[in-house]
Image: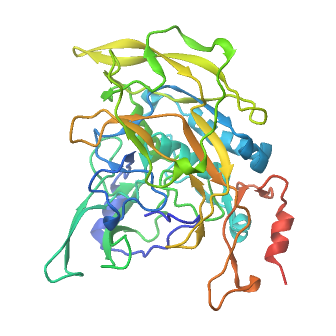
Amino acid sequence: MRNYFGAGTVTRSLKTIGCVLLLASCVHTGRAFSLLGPFDTWQIQEITYQMGSDIGGPQNLGEEYRIPMPTLFYAFESSFLDYFGSNGVAEVEKAIKIINDLPAVSLLSQQLTEFQLEARRDNYQAAALSLLDLKSYTLNLLIEQMGLAEPERYTWTLRARFVLPAGCPVVNYSVIQRNFDPVTWEPTPYVNGVLYTYQIIEVCMGTPFLADAFEIQVDPLAISFNSVAGLNLPLGGFFTGLTRDDVGGLRYLYRKNNFNNEALPNNATIGGGGGVVPVAGGISSPWTPFFPTNFTAGTNVVGVPVAATNVLSVRGGIDKIIFRRVNFDSLLGSNFVAVADAYTATTLVNSRQTGQRITRQVLTPDFVFTARDLGVFNPPANAVTVARRLLSVQNTGPAGLNGPGIINTPITITYNKLGNVLINNGPAFIDEASSFRDFTWASFDGTTNAPVIYPSGRSIMDLEAQLLRP
């Protein structure tokens, strides 16, 4: 279960439930992933869906959502450049490079042994200064927008809650798994080799969130909640790359033989030439970036494709995604040089695979990185919003199913540039000396190099001086 409102991790109780399960955890290969899509009708706040930062819920196999095109264009808005500077751009591009450096999923080994089980490390100086790593957070946001949900959170999850006539806490629950093995595709209680059980937490009343199947690691010595998709990242923590199960989830989504009934991207047509070329006429119409009001929780876009000849086809996964940077005049009008991006998708026609040429008229970047003052959450917790984004999809599944479908672009990721925030709790702790610090954006790693603090131009000495205030 993620900490939805702040940058730290949720404190968890650890419990051992027996030697048999411990032995099983030692011999099981222990891998899993979860799939992200729009909230199903039963995924309600009462059973801990649609939490503060949620943009979707866990999907069943066959109801997944994925990006349908192999090349994604990204850009930085001037607000991001002003706040994070060139160092911030470099950190976002480090996260993008991790995605770009992945082989085509068809080239991965069956057991994914080339990938690490645990990619999280700690920088203790950054932890002491309450720093949040920009690259690591961005890496999570990227694979989320590619279709992955939090595997640890949905290893066990509530499907229904029934209050009996005697009243709460006399309640019956239905518990399901939305966490799948990337080799067998079977539901599994393991993530990156760690075995999880659950305990149901019930609060009866007083909050929209009444019950949850709370994951508990079986082995108290295991390094738990360690996937990048899960983002259980403490202050001072950072990711060195993707874990085995993160990659396993991407392989399931984007493998060539994963055929789904899919629509074309909104800006695509059947046919066209090859490669990426500028659109005739050079400069396209101005692009107006999306602002934070587009990212209010619960306003995700779930659409249906426009009916047109050959728009819907049974298409396989695209095997590999590449991010390419594009530039636009973010200070003098936000004009974007449009391109025609042509690629070949594999379609299934009369049980035979065939190539289908598709051309996108890319009039805006697929991913845009921005920065805004996003404020804080209160209630239920007085904590600073980290970032905002939405999930825009087209559901092309059969009637009554929550998928499968495609993830639409453009996608805007907005980072909070609120700056340094001190938190006080009344009535007793209401002065500077009794305050505590919320997160500060930074970049750091496992070397002896000092962290880079944002906004651009701020120094670590400034931050340390504030911590040592009289």
Task: Identify the residue at image location x=22%, y=34%.
Answer: 398
Tell which residue pokes out farthest to the top in this image: 273
Residue 410 x/y as whole percent: 54, 35
Q: Quadrant of the N terminus?
A: bottom left
Left or right, 203 with reference to 75 = left
Tell which residue pokes out farthest to the left in this image: 165
Q: Confirm whether residue 241 shows in the render.
A: no
Q: Confirm whether residue 329 shows in the render.
A: yes
Tell which residue pokes out farthest to the bottom in this image: 428
Query: Relative to residue 4, is residue 412 depicted above or below?
Result: above
Residue 25 x/y as whole percent: 35, 60
Query: Relative to residue 126, is residue 278 depicted above or below?
Result: above
Q: Quadrant of the C terminus?
A: bottom right
Q: Quadrant of residue 183?
A: top left
Q: How is the image coloured?
A: rainbow
Q: Quadrant of residue 120?
A: bottom right
What is the count of numbered marks?
0
Residue 206 x/y as whole percent: 37, 79
For the residue pair 181 and 420, the one nearer the viewer reads as 420
For the residue pair 159 and 270, the one nearer the viewer reads as 270
Task: Identify the residue at image location x=71%, y=29%.
Answer: 327
Left or right, 214 with reference to 334 = left
Residue 451 x/y as whole percent: 77, 58
Query: Relative to residue 57, is residue 61 depicted above or below?
Result: above
For the residue pair 207 and 8, the one nearer the viewer reads as 207
Q: Quadrant of residue 258?
A: top left
Left or right, 348 with reference to 376 = left
